[in-house]
Image: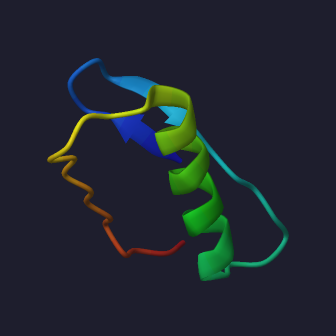
Amino acid sequence: MVIDLFSRQIVDWSMAEHMKTQWVNDALLMAIWKRKPSKGLLWHTDRGSQ
């Protein structure tokens, strides 16, 4: 799930039956495509799992 911490809105998400990094990348790329952020985007992941 990608959350915009400024607006506190969910921007995009991906789901699958497995936990692979491709799903994280897909969610991030879709969020960037939807929101078209300006230069200087700060991206943070918690790197946690279930």
Q: Provide residue 46's location: percent of width, then percent of height.
A: 31, 67
Above or below for 28 versus 22? above
As drawn, is 29 to the left or to the right of 46?
right
Q: Quadrant of the C terminus?
A: bottom right
Image coordinates of residue 5 in percent, x first then y, are 25, 32
Q: Residue lying farthest top?
A: 7
Front in this rendered view, residue 38 or 23: 38
Residue occupying image coordinates x 42% and y 32%: 36
Instruction: Report which quarter residue 7 is drawn in.
Output: top left
Residue, far left: 40
Coloring scheme used: rainbow
Q: Quadrant of residue 4?
A: top left
In the rendered image, the residue lying farthest to the right is 17
Which residue is drawn at the image coordinates 40% and 37% (left, top)?
Answer: 3
- How many numbered dots are placed on residues in this image? 0
Quadrant of the image occupied by residue 37? top left
* Residue under the image location 40 percent in, 74 percent down: 48
Q: Position of residue 22 (x, y in %)?
A: 66, 75
Q: Is residue 17 above or below residue 19?
A: above
Residue at x-position 70% and y-position 52%: 14
13 vs 46, left or right, is: right
